[in-house]
């Protein structure tokens, strides 16, 4: 019951945050010294991270674990495919907005093939046909046209983001066909998507606990890098050159 | 008497090991992308054939890494650039411990991923590098079920003739590994000093090993 309320509130929260983000980024100019240059809002972010983590431990992770154990693997794959198919349609639009003709075409064909022949996207026939997926959201599109990511931002429930990606969220929301469904089915779909995604990440999150000295910092640095990588299509320019060990001073 | 014999024996074995160790690198003029291709193929083939690895046997994976991958990795450079400026002030003992603990931690990262590797294929993207380049990036794509995984390597040409190439950074899905540890390490160093970082790493590795022994990872 509680979970449903949370999910209902979740769209509202993200909308408010978008408005808040602009203000926050201004107030955050007085960043803590010695902090990460891309994370002036660190103390706020750590608060939200702690909230997400507590919620995850108490509700989301147990539900996702049960879901993984109860649902047969083909069903889970079907759910994953279904949501990925909707994303493909939106990726087609964003690839087009980024003037990436081939990627846009592929995404569109993927959406067409899987929607028509793949039981509304439950089966991913397009991948088996060798048509590549090019996942792109509106945050990528803004980045492509030169909008910088801005400060790192952790969103309630949604996790790692940046100011740019957060501003893009309502647009992504509009691009999701489910946003036009009636409220109960939209909420059900959002909850299912959340649980299914979390179930996919069970192993990864366990590994994060093992390999990260500080999961917050690890997640932040990995997220910022991977978004940047995606905006540059896997080929970002060097931010800095990693020095050889100690150069001349050592050895 | 016996002691002297032992020492001589050790130095002899050491000498042999050293020669063997440098042998593969002697196959000198192998291009960096060819090297990565060979290593990847070898690793995938081994995983494919090895039930222990597929079951997530960390010790077996560490053994495999030491044998096949580590000779081609400049792990000192990886560690020093993750540690940052504090590396310069570190004593040789501190450096050695940092290296070995960091290595354990990273191998742990891989053991989880590797145990899931089944029926994988890979491709290497065309490399853009001039012949005189001392540092290059080799980009690969690992394909299995689901979306392909981007796996890139930074390599440096080692000093001396025919010494070949060595990996000094690794990119998984757009995330450079060394860079991802840099802030975490500096956080730890700022709070507790270099020995604090070493202690934290050691503790973490012990906890991971204990957890792994109690509950073997599922495949």
Image (cartoon, coloured by chain):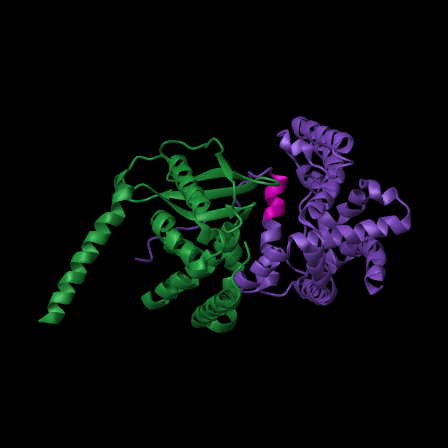
Chain colours: A purple, B green
Who's the residue at 46% across and 32% down the image?
B128
Q: Is residue A18 above or below residue A58?
A: above
Q: In the image, A238: left or right of A9?
A: left
Foreground pick, A51 / B69:
B69
Q: Which image quadrant is residue A118 in?
A: top right
Q: Is residue A234 above or below residue B175?
A: above
Q: Is residue A198 above or below residue A44?
A: above
Foreground pick, B19 / B198:
B19
Who's the residue at 72% across and 36% down the image?
A88
Q: Which image quadrant is residue B165 in?
A: top left
Foreground pick, B196 / A131:
A131
Q: Which image quadrant is residue B161 in?
A: top left
Foreground pick, A94 / B55:
B55
Residue A149 place in picture, x, y as percent: 67, 48
Magenta part, dominant SS = helix
Q: In the image, A205: left or right of B42?
A: right
Stretch of the chain drawn in magenta: A226-232
Residue A217 place in picture, x, y as percent: 59, 61
Who's the residue at 45% across and 32% down the image?
B127
Q: Is residue B84 visible?
A: no
Look at the image and say whether residue A160 sits in the magenta stretch: no
Q: Is residue B67 above or below residue B5?
A: above
Look at the image and say whether residue A228 sits in the magenta stretch: yes
> In which quadrant will I find the N terminus of chain B?
bottom left
């Amino acid at each position: 019951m509680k979970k449903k309320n949370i999910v209902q509130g979740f769209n509202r929260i993200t909308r408010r945050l978008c408005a808040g983000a602009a203000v926050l980024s201004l107030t955050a100019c007085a960043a803590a010294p010695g902090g990460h240059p891309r994370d002036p809002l660190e103390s706020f972010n750590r608060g939200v991270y702690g909230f997400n983590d507590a919620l995850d431990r108490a509700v989301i992770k147990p539900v996702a674990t049960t879901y993984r154990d109860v649902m047969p693997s083909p069903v889970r794959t079907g759910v994953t495919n279904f949501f990925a198919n909707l994303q493909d349609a939106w990726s087609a639009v964003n690839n087009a907005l980024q003037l990436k003709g081939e990627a846009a075409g592929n995404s569109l064909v993927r959406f067409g093939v899987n929607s028509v022949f793949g039981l509304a996207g439950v089966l991913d026939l397009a991948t088996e046909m060798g048509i590549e997926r090019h996942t792109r959201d509106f945050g990528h599109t803004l980045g492509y046209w030169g909008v910088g990511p801005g400060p790192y931002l952790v969103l309630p429930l949604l996790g790692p983001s940046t100011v740019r990606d957060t501003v893009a969220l309502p647009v992504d929301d509009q691009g999701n066909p489910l946003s036009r469904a009636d409220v109960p089915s939209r909420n059900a779909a959002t909850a299912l998507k959340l649980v299914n995604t979390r179930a996919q990440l069970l192993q990864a999150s366990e590994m994060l606990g093992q390999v990260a000295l500080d999961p917050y910092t690890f997640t932040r640095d990995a997220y910022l890098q991977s978004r940047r990588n995606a905006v540059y299509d896997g080929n970002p320019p060097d931010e800095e050159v990693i020095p050889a060990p100690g150069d001349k001073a050592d050895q | 008497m016996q002691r002297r014999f032992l020492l001589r024996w050790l130095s002899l074995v050491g000498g042999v090991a050293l020669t063997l160790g440098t042998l593969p690198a002697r196959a000198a003029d192998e291009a960096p992308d060819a090297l990565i291709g060979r290593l990847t193929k070898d690793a995938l083939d081994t995983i494919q054939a090895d039930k222990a690895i597929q079951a997530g046997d960390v010790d077996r994976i560490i053994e495999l890494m030491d044998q096949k991958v580590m000779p081609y990795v400049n792990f000192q450079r990886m560690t020093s650039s993750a540690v940052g400026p504090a590396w310069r002030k570190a004593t040789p003992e501190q450096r050695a411990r940092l290296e070995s603990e960091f290595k354990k931690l990273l191998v742990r990262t891989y053991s989880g991923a590797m145990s899931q590797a089944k029926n994988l294929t890979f491709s290497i993207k065309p490399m853009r590098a001039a012949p005189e380049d001392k540092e290059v990036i080799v980009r690969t794509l690992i394909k299995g079920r689901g979306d392909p995984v981007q796996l890139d390597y930074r390599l440096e040409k080692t000093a001396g003739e025919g010494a070949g190439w060595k990996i000094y950074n690794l990119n998984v899905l757009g995330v450079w590994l060394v860079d991802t540890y840099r802030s975490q390490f500096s956080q730890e160093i700022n709070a507790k000093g270099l020995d604090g970082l070493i202690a934290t790493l050691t503790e973490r590795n012990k906890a991971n090993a204990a957890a792994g022994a109690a509950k073997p990872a599922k495949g």
